[in-house]
């Protein structure tokens, strides 16, 4: 009976935590993962599976960045090892970092100047 109780305690204490950390240069970009808004960089987001994730970053004055990133499973999450990792009495954490560099949107500045000139011309005509 004691062995059974000990086995239940050991099995119930294991945990694997998966969170991806999204970073951008410059920080503060709005992040969408697989079409769902998750916050502004830097941000940590829990995930369930390893594989492809579609990541979109948006920030005013910068070009929208749309990338697909592959998250690779650590060895202790490979088939076979994952069963052992899930029942170990320790917390295992995997936090891959995904970094992105946003490029300034030159077109946004040009459009702003054109709109300002058009507005100026309209107000001068009146």
Image: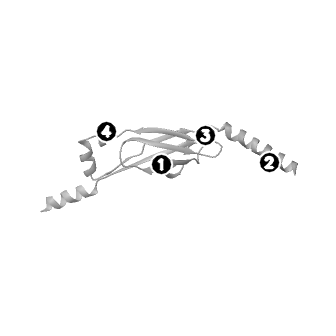
Q: Is residue 2 left or right of residue 104?
A: left
Q: Say which of 57 and 17 sits in front.
A: 57
Q: Is residue 94 left or right of residue 27?
A: left
User: Please, what secondary structure does the residue beneath circle 1 have?
Assistant: loop
The reply to whether discs 3 and 2 touch (Cβ–Cβ < 8 Å) is: no
Q: Residue furthest left?
A: 1
**Within-10-Å neighbours for mark 1: few <14, some 14–19, many 20+:** few
In this view, the mark in front (3 or 2):
2
In this view, the mark in front (4 or 3):
3
Give percent across and percent down for residue 65: 55, 40
Residue on which the image places disc 4: 75
Cα–Cα span, label 4 and label 3: 36 Å
Q: Is residue 28 left or right of residue 49?
A: right
Cα–Cα span, label 3 and label 2: 25 Å
Residue on which the image places disc 1: 35
Quick one: label 1 or label 4, which is nearer the N terminus? Answer: 1
Quick one: label 3 or label 2, which is nearer the N terminus? Answer: 3
**Within-10-Å neighbours for mark 4: few <14, some 14–19, many 20+:** few
**Within-10-Å neighbours for mark 2: few <14, some 14–19, many 20+:** few
In this view, the mark in front (1 or 4):
1
Residue on which the image places disc 2: 119
The reply to whether discs 3 and 1 touch (Cβ–Cβ < 8 Å) is: no
**Number of numbered discs overlaid on the protein picture:** 4
User: Please, what secondary structure does the residue beneath circle 3 have?
Assistant: loop
Quick one: label 1 or label 2, which is nearer the N terminus? Answer: 1
Residue on which the image places disc 3: 63
Cα–Cα span, label 2 and label 4: 60 Å
- Asked if one can make out residue 19 in the rendered structure from this viewpoint, the answer is yes
User: Please, what secondary structure does the residue beneath circle 4 have?
Assistant: helix
Quick one: label 2 or label 4, which is nearer the N terminus? Answer: 4
User: Please, what secondary structure does the residue beneath circle 2 have?
Assistant: helix
């Amino acid at each position: 009976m004691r062995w059974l109780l000990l086995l239940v305690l050991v099995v119930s204490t294991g945990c694997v935590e998966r969170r991806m950390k999204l970073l951008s240069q410059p920080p503060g970009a709005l992040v969408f993962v697989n079409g769902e808004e998750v916050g502004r960089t830097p941000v940590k987001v829990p995930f369930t599976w390893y594989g492809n994730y579609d990541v979109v970053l948006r920030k005013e004055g910068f070009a929208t960045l749309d990338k697909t990133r592959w998250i690779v499973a650590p060895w202790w999450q490979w088939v076979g090892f994952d069963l052992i990792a899930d029942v170990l009495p320790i917390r295992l954490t995997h936090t891959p970092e995904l970094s992105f560099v946003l490029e300034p949107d030159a077109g946004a500045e040009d459009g702003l100047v054109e709109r300002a000139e058009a507005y100026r011309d309209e107000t001068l005509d009146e």
